[in-house]
Image (cartoon, rainbow, N blue to C red):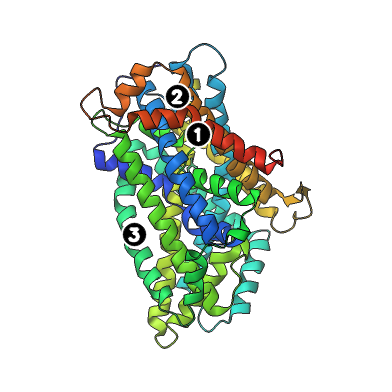
C-alpha cells in the first residue's frame, strides 16, 4: 500500500523535532527518575546509557528504514516490505503496544494538569514535605478527579491528531520543544544549588556496582526503549512522513542525544532536590509529584512569587512534553485504522480516543479503589507498565532489528541509510553487525537473565 501522495513533514528540522517530541516525555521526566531511584542510581544510568547507544540508536535507524521505505504506518509497513509470512504480526503487535501505553500514560499526563491547576491556584504555598505526600495520595486515589483530567488530556491529544500531520504534530513540536529545553535547564540549576544537593548528585554519578541485579538490566533496557519511543513502530510511523532529504543516522543521533540530555537533566532536577528535603529516591511513580513542589517551595522560600511561577512552569512543561508523546502514541493506532480499514482520520481517531479512555479509567482506578485487584503482585496500572515497557517494547525492538538485519533486501537497507548513495556509509558495517547479532542476542540475554536462566 504505497501512497505516493503521502503527506510529509515540511523540513528536516521538522522531522527531528517531531521525533524528539515523541521521545521526550513523561518517560524522561517522570519515569526515568523513579526507575533510576528504584534501581540504585548511577549504576542504572550507566547501563541505561549503554542500552541507548548500543541497542537504541541502531534500532531507531532500523525503524526509520522500515517506515520511510514502506511509506506506511507500522501496522502496514511490515506487510509492505515482507508480504508473505508472519512479519505483519510484528506491526500489529506494535499497534497494540502503543494503544496500551497510551491508556495508562494518559493517566499520568492527566496528573500533570491537576498539578498545573494546583500550582496556578497557589495551593503549594507553605506546605511541608508530608503534606505534599498526602496531597498526592489523596488526589491519585480519588475515584473522580484524576478521571476528569485524564479525559481532558485525551481530548487535547485527539484535537491535535485530527488536525493532521503537518499542521498538528509538526507545528506544535516546533514551538513546544525549545520551550521545554529552556525550562528544564533553569530548574536543574535551581535544584543543584539547594542546600544538601551534593548527596543527590553523588547518587546520580557514583555507581555502586553491588546494586547490579537482573532487574537493573531489564529496567534499563525497558526504560531505553520506552524513552526513545522504540519497539512499537512509533518512530517508523513518523519516518513514513520523512522526506527523502532526511538523514536517518543523523536524525537518530539527534533524537538520542536530546532525549538523554532531558532525562539526565530531569535526574538533576529530582535527586538533589529529593535528598535536600529528605525524600527517599525510591518513592516510585509519585516521585516528581512530591519532590518537585516541595523543592520549589524551599528553594524560593524567601520569594513566594518566584516559587509560584516556577511551579506553574514546571508542570506546564511536563504537560507539554507529555502531549507531544501522547500525540505520537495516538498517531500509530489512528494511522493504522485509517490505512487498514479506510476510516476517515477523524473517525479512526475517535475510536482510539474512546477506547484508550476506557483503559485509562481502569488504570487510574487501579491506583485507588481497585488497588486490590493484582496480577503477579502488581496493580493493573503497574502491570500494564511492566508488560508494555519491559516486555512488549524490547520484543518489538528485537523483531525490528532482525527484520532489517536479516529479512529485507540489503540494497534497501543501504539505500535508506545513505539516502540513495548520497551520504558516506562509514558506520554501515557496525550498524549491520549490531542489527544482526548484538541487538537480538543482547535483548534475549537480558530476558533470560531476568528469568533466571543464566544461572
Ligand atoms: N517516549 C515517550 C516518553 O519518554 O515519554 C513515551 C513513548 C512515546 C513511548 C511513544 C513509546 C512511544 F511509541
> Mark 1 or 3 closer to N-term?
3
Q: Is residue 276 left or right of residue 373?
A: left
How many residues crowd mark 1 within 10 Å: few (<14), some (14–19), many (20+)? many
Which residue is at 71% across, 38% downward?
Answer: 453
Circle 2: element type:
helix
Q: Position of residue 70 (x, y in %)?
A: 39, 21
Task: Return the disc, 2 or 3, that comes first in the chain's sequence.
Answer: 3
Give the percent coordinates (x, y) of residue 102.
54, 43
Q: Sort mark 3 into few (<14), some (14-19) or many (20+) by Cα contacts within 10 Å.
A: some
Does residue 168 appear anywhere in the picture? Answer: no
Indicate whether 122 appears above or below 259.
Answer: below
Where residue 20 appears, as percent x and y from the top left, is 37, 46
Q: Distance between the residues labelled 1 and 2?
A: 10 Å
Left or right, 77 with reference to 212: left
Instruction: Tell whether circle 2 marks a residue whose Cβ is less than 8 angstroms from ligand 1.
Output: no
To which residue does mark 1 refer?
Answer: 439
110 or 303: nearer the viewer: 303
Q: Do the residues labelled 2 and 3 touch (CB within 8 Å)?
A: no
Which residue shows up at 38% across the image and 56% down it?
Answer: 261
Q: Which residue lies furthest to the right in this view?
A: 372
Badge 1 or badge 2: first in the primary sequence: 2
Which quadrant of the structure image shows residue 305?
A: bottom left
Residue 75 in the figure: left or right of residue 283:
left
Structural distance between the alpha carbons of marks 2 and 3: 35 Å
The C terminus sits in image quarter? top right
Judging by the rendered image, the residue that carries numbered circle 3 is 181
Amino acid at each position: 500500500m504505497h501512497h505516493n501522495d503521502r503527506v510529509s513533514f515540511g523540513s528536516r528540522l521538522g522531522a527531528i523535532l517531531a521525533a524528539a517530541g515523541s521521545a521526550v516525555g513523561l518517560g524522561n521526566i517522570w519515569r526515568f527518575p523513579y526507575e533510576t531511584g528504584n534501581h540504585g542510581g548511577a549504576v542504572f544510568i550507566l547501563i541505561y546509557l549503554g542500552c541507548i547507544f548500543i541497542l537504541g540508536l541502531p534500532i531507531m535507524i532500523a525503524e526509520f528504514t522500515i517506515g520511510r521505505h514502506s511509506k506506511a504506518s507500522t501496522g502496514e509497513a511490515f506487510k509492505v516490505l515482507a508480504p508473505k509470512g508472519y512479519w505483519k504480526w510484528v506491526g500489529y503487535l506494535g499497534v497494540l503496544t502503543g494503544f496500551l501505553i497510551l491508556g495508562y500514560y494518559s493517566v499520568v499526563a492527566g496528573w500533570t494538569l491537576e498539578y498545573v491547576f494546583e500550582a496556578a491556584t497557589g495551593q503549594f504555598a507553605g506546605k511541608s514535605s508530608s503534606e505534599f505526600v498526602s496531597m498526592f495520595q489523596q488526589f491519585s486515589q480519588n475515584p473522580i478527579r484524576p478521571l476528569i483530567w485524564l479525559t481532558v488530556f485525551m481530548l487535547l491529544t485527539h484535537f491535535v491528531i485530527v488536525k493532521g500531520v503537518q499542521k498538528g504534530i509538526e507545528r506544535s513540536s516546533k514551538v513546544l520543544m525549545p520551550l521545554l529545553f529552556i525550562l528544564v535547564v533553569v530548574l536543574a540549576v535551581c535544584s543543584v544549588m539547594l542546600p544538601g544537593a551534593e548527596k543527590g548528585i553523588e547518587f546520580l554519578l557514583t555507581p555502586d556496582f553491588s546494586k547490579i541485579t537482573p532487574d537493573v538490566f531489564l529496567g534499563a533496557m525497558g526504560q531505553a526503549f520506552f524513552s526513545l519511543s522504540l519497539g512499537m513502530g512509533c518512530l517508523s510511523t513518523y519516518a513514513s512522513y520523512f522526506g527523502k532529504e532526511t538523514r536517518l543516522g543523523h536524525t537518530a543521533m539527534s533524537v538520542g542525544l536530546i532525549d538523554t540530555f532531558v532525562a539526565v537533566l530531569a535526574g538533576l532536577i529530582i535527586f538533589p532536590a529529593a535528598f535536600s528535603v529528605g525524600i527517599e529516591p525510591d518513592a516510585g511513580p509519585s516521585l516528581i509529584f512530591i519532590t518537585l513542589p516541595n523543592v520549589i517551595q524551599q528553594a524560593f522560600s524567601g520569594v513566594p512569587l518566584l516559587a509560584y511561577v516556577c511551579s506553574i512552569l514546571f508542570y506546564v512543561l511536563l504537560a507539554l512534553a507529555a502531549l507531544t508523546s501522547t500525540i505520537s502514541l495516538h498517531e500509530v493506532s489512528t494511522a493504522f485504522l485509517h490505512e487498514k480499514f479506510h476510516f476517515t482520520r477523524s473517525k479512526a481517531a475517535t475510536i482510539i480516543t474512546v477506547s484508550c479512555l476506557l483503559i485509562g479509567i481502569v488504570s487510574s482506578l487501579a491506583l485507588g479503589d481497585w488497588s486490590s485487584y493484582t496480577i503477579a503482585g502488581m496493580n493493573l496500572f503497574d502491570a500494564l507498565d511492566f508488560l508494555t515497557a519491559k516486555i512488549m517494547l524490547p520484543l518489538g525492538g528485537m523483531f525490528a532489528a532482525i527484520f532489517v538485519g536479516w529479512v529485507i533486501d540489503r540494497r534497501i537497507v543501504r539505500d535508506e541509510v545513505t539516502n540513495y548513495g548520497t551520504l558516506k556509509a562509514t558506520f554501515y558495517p557496525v550498524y549491520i553487525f549490531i542489527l544482526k547479532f548484538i541487538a537480538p542476542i543482547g535483548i534475549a540475554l537480558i530476558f533470560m537473565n531476568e528469568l533466571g536462566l543464566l544461572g
